[in-house]
Amino acid sequence: MSQGVLQAKLWYAQRISAMILGICVAIHLLIIFYAIRGGISAQEILGRTQGNIAFALFYELFVLACFVHAPIGVANILQETIPKTGLAKPISWVLAIAILALGTTAVVGVYTGGSL
């Protein structure tokens, strides 16, 4: 795959993940406002989300969109800031793995009431 094709695919991946993130953030904020307005506690929130597959799938989609979006942006920033070091790809991969691992652990923890 040529460098130009790869850059185009990364550009599309970042834009599509940004659209998904925008929707997820809006829904997440609506959920927060609903919870605050209703005055429910963290215990009550966990009571409603534990075992709720819709919440788990929604937040895992959120995690996956972050997993795609953030490392591409960080790699671009690092490539422009420190181009000759070769650190952009390794740092972006570490970030991607951290987002996926930590985000999925949080989703599983809320869904099950425990951890992986």
Image: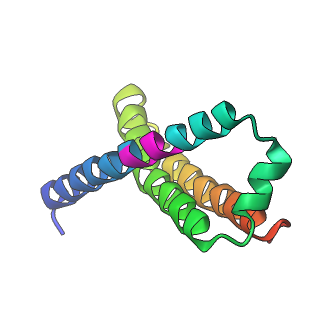
Q: Residue at x 51, y 39 (%)?
A: 30
Identify the main secondary structure in magenta: helix
For the record, the magenta segment spans 23-28
Q: Quadrant of residue 34?
A: top right
Foreground residue among 113 and 92: 113
Q: Residue at x 14, y 60 (%)?
A: 5
| Vertical relation: 24 (above or below) 112 | above
Q: Residue at x 44, y 48 (%)?
A: 24
Q: Residue at x 54, y 68 (%)?
A: 57
Confirm whether the magenta stretch covers residue 56. Answer: no
Q: Quadrant of residue 81?
A: top left
> Image quadrant for the C terminus?
bottom right
Q: Is residue 16 left or right of residue 69?
A: left
> Image quadrant for the N terminus?
bottom left
* Residue 76 shows in this picture: yes
* Residue 83 shows in this picture: no
Foreground residue among 50 and 109: 50
Total marks shown come to: 0
